[in-house]
Image (spheres, rainbow, N blue to C red):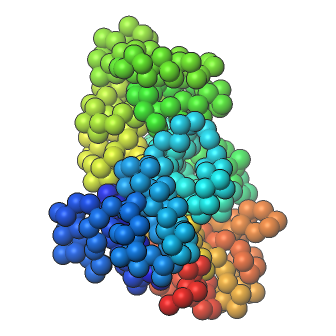
Amino acid sequence: MNVVIIGMGEVGKHITEVLLSEGQNVTLIDESESALAHAHETMDVITLRGDGGSIATLSQAGIDHSHLVVAVTDNDEINLLACLLAKRLGAEKVVARVSDTGDPLASEGQWAENLGIDLVISPERAAAVEIRRIVDSAGLSWVESFGEDRIEMIQVKVERDSSESIGKALKDIRLPENALVAAIGRGETFIIPDGNEHIANGDEVYLIGRSDALPNARTILAGPYRQTSKVVIMGASATGRALAHLLEKSGINTTIIERDSERAQQLAMELESGVVLRGDGTQSDFLKEENLNNADIFIATTKSDELNLMAGLLAKKLGIATAIAIAHKPDYAPIYRELGIDHTISPRLLAAKEVLRYMRRGPTVSVSVLADGAGEILELEAEEGSAITGNRLADVGFPQGARIGAVTTDEGVHVPGGDFKVPEGARVIVFSTPDNHDAVEKMFHANRKSIFSLKK
């Protein structure tokens, strides 16, 4: 597959690395000579310095022979223009990054329909949706959603003062029918458990299942929890605005803090019930005066990573239970967590993930990393004639160290037992260690395919 990527920021870099690992041919276009030089030194790619919105540059990149063009610069106009030109010049599929669609709730599908672009992605919108999921799950780390959002996964910490499950074997814990403990993080150890595994104090338990079953499963494992009722957002950025609209629709008491008076006034006019305050979310006196230190969740969504970190740490110091911070530089995320931020969101990596998910067809739909790489979640499609289909799961010889967490079919979501038979075309969520990745994939495909393997 021939892929042209325009823009070597975090989104373009991440997509390039994944595509190269899959053996694809990649050409990079960027106006930064230093960024291209670094890419040329560290990756097996063709580099071209120039304007991605230029016909001459696109033609020089061989756009008429490209199977996919991904425009992910920081300039919306260049991305859209590049995709429109690329399509006219013969590219098969085009994907554009659009940072701010103007209307925070506008349908991206409408952009694609009106402009003829195959996929329009917004890092800011993706971040807002991800944060709302965490808010909806009462501050838990929402690790992932699968099966076209029909399957959800959360991570809970089991502690002695709140859980009655400590010391019990999983087979003796009565979880709801459509929920499953798929993995356990225990210190430096990552466990794919069977029914004989016992829950220990301090375990990070990964629960997967239908969304309506997870709250009860969470209570059984980790004890009662408080539902989210009050949220504070710092920053009327594109992400903050989109998130405010989403939370308003969820009926959650939301307050937005914004330094800039014009942005604050604009957002106040857009919202029906949300409260917008002009002020500084990094000032403890301001938060106390406005009675914001009693919020359940504090979310920092400014364009400054440093401000987001400072505000999140201050919120924790003031007693707010959960702090979420946007990390525009993905490398900052683990540092944020080490310093005490509960959840970090990288809009750019979320956007890259959307592109990769759109591109993939065949067995592997998506791959997510758990516990800093100690575990993986694979979303796979059971191909016709693959080893996983047609037989009882107990009889297919599934790799040890891997576990099926859930299956989605036309009939619904299943948390399967040993007697379950995976039908062809089903989406299957598998928890695995990295050394089992290839063995698991082999169970799901007869012949490896890709939507863009029409021309090789």
Q: Is residue 73 visible?
A: yes
Q: Where is residue 339 drawn, in percent x and y?
A: 26, 40
Q: In terms of depth relative to the viewer, which is nearer, 421 or 417?
A: 421
Q: Is residue 131 above or below residue 316?
A: below
Q: Is residue 152 above or below residue 248?
A: below
Q: At 75% from the left edge and 87% from the top edge, which residue is drawn?
A: 390
Q: In terms of depth relative to the viewer, which is nearer, 360 or 430?
A: 360
Occupied quadrant, residue 41? bottom left
Q: Where is residue 105 drawn, in percent x and y?
A: 61, 38
Q: In terms of depth relative to the viewer, which is nearer, 227 or 355?
A: 355
How many numbered marks have been drawn onto this rendered protein structure? 0
Q: In the displayed orientation, state which residue is furthest to the front.
A: 56
Q: At 58% from the left edge and 31% from the top edge, which residue is drawn?
A: 245
Q: In the displayed orientation, state which residue is furthest to the right.
A: 411
Q: Is residue 54 left or right of residue 401?
A: left
Q: Is residue 42 left or right of residue 298?
A: left
Q: In terms of depth relative to the viewer, which is nearer, 258 or 155?
A: 258
Q: Where is residue 373 drawn, in percent x and y?
A: 36, 66
Q: Is residue 161 visible?
A: no
Q: At 19% from the left edge and 64% from the top edge, which residue is drawn?
A: 33
Q: Is residue 424 above or below residue 244?
A: below
Q: Is residue 314 left or right of residue 358?
A: left
Q: Where is residue 336 drawn, in percent x and y?
A: 29, 43
Q: At 48% from the left edge and 79% from the top edge, which residue is drawn?
A: 64
